Image (cartoon, grey):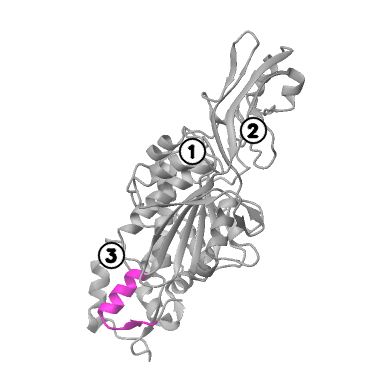
Amino acid sequence: MSSRKGLSNSEEVPPIDLHGLVRELFPINRSLTGAGVRETLAILARHIQLEVREVPSGTAVLDWHVPLEWNIRGATIRALDGRCLVDFADNNLHVVGYSKPIHEEVSRAELAQHVHTLPDQPELIPYRTGYFADDWGFCMPDNLWRTMQDESYRVDIDSDLSPGSLTYGELFLPGELSDEVLITAHVCHPSLANDNLSGIAVAVALAMRQAQRRRQLGCRFLFIPATIGAITWLAHNESQLGKIRHGLVLTCIGDAGPFHYKLSRSGAPIDNAVAHILRHSGQPYEIVPFSPYGYDERQFCSPGFNLPVGCLMRSVHGTFPEYHTSADNVDFVKPQALNQSYALVAELLDLLDGNRMYARTDGRGEPQLGRRGLYRAIAGQKEAGGANQMDLLWLLNLADGRHSLLDIAERADIPFSRVQAAVRLAKDADLIREEHSP
């Protein structure tokens, strides 16, 4: 784990209250499909010009098919005297995702085959799904289950699985070039604040930010159900995938843990870009290798596509005790952590968009800086955190049409923003010209 202090720009303030958006979305019951996903996307569409797409159940997508749509209106477990012991209305983690309907009196022994608890975390409700199980189930605190010793219980799940569609949201902001940056977040989890809503909230704020900026690269934002949503999008956009130059999956980025970046499968340029931003962020971080397990980076990086997509997290999924439990609530997600995550990715987007190649207009020897007023210009921006003399000398030495600005920042061991400040000085003095994007 690494960190370096005092080198990053001041953190940018997000355009919306990120924690407020998490709180608003938290009560909604989301799954792979259904009304909860549509309700979530409708809220996001108040902030960004989201295009909501529906793909019918049964549609073939690569090796998969779009599943039936699942909706649930309520669910309870009651004692035979009528006392309600478990109620979906209290917490939507109580029902296993994609549970089929049931209205029966069952024995405790039979009910035990359909109950999920966490004996090591007896006060918490686990999150469980059974997307393709054709079954039903309940999740509850282990402490509660141990008190339920009656011979029989009344079980009701008011749900349906029927032909419908898979719903996802997409926003594309074109740039001056045809190349794109892809940002994705999954929208298929119910009331889980870090694993689900943190990525959604930060992605929305980034989309709002990018919509207000002039862009060299296009920006595409996807809000998709995990796995099947990514597979569906890939299947429907194969002809356009060559335009994706950089991609990032956002998940679990609202807790107070250190940043973790999971590398792309191919060792793509975004890996170097994220590592650079993290190294100069002043925040603790760790770079982790690619593996074919995790979130949708494994779909985007799968054989046949191998897109340049990594995954940004704070605490890594499956490694923190709140993961996939009722403890992953709005209090677990911290406003400061959300804002830090937003600022870090905003800086990354600026780097990706501004990472260009330059060449000296006259590359023979070191130019005379004094007669061009560059020493005065450097002094003038010193208080603003701009370039210093060494930054400018590194730029003028490596601006040869073969080194990108990120290459120069890495070689000089300085933040990318300082190389950009040096570029502005050198361009004003007519010492460099833009060649092309790397």
Q: Nearer the viewer, residue 97 or 323?
A: 97
Kindly identify the amino acid type of the residue bearing the numbered disc 3.
Lys
- Residue at the extreme front of the image, as rendered: 163
Give the Cα separation between the discs numbered 3 and 2. 65 Å
Horizontal arrangement in the rendering, residue 364 relative to residue 128 (left or right): left
Amino acid type, callout 2: Lys
Q: Is residue 163 visible?
A: yes
Q: Are marks 2 and 1 in contact (CB under 8 Å)?
A: no
Q: Which mark is residue 100?
A: 2
- Element type at mark 1: helix
Q: Is residue 432 magenta?
A: yes
- Residue 353 vertical placement versus 254 (above, below): below
Q: Say whether disc 1 or disc 3 marks the residue closer to the N-terminus.
A: 1
Residue 143: horizontal and vertical position, in percent?
65, 20
The residue sitting at 46% across, 35% down in the picture is: 26
Residue 382 is marked as 3
Task: From the top left corner, tell me how far across and down residue 72 is, in percent.
Answer: 55, 32
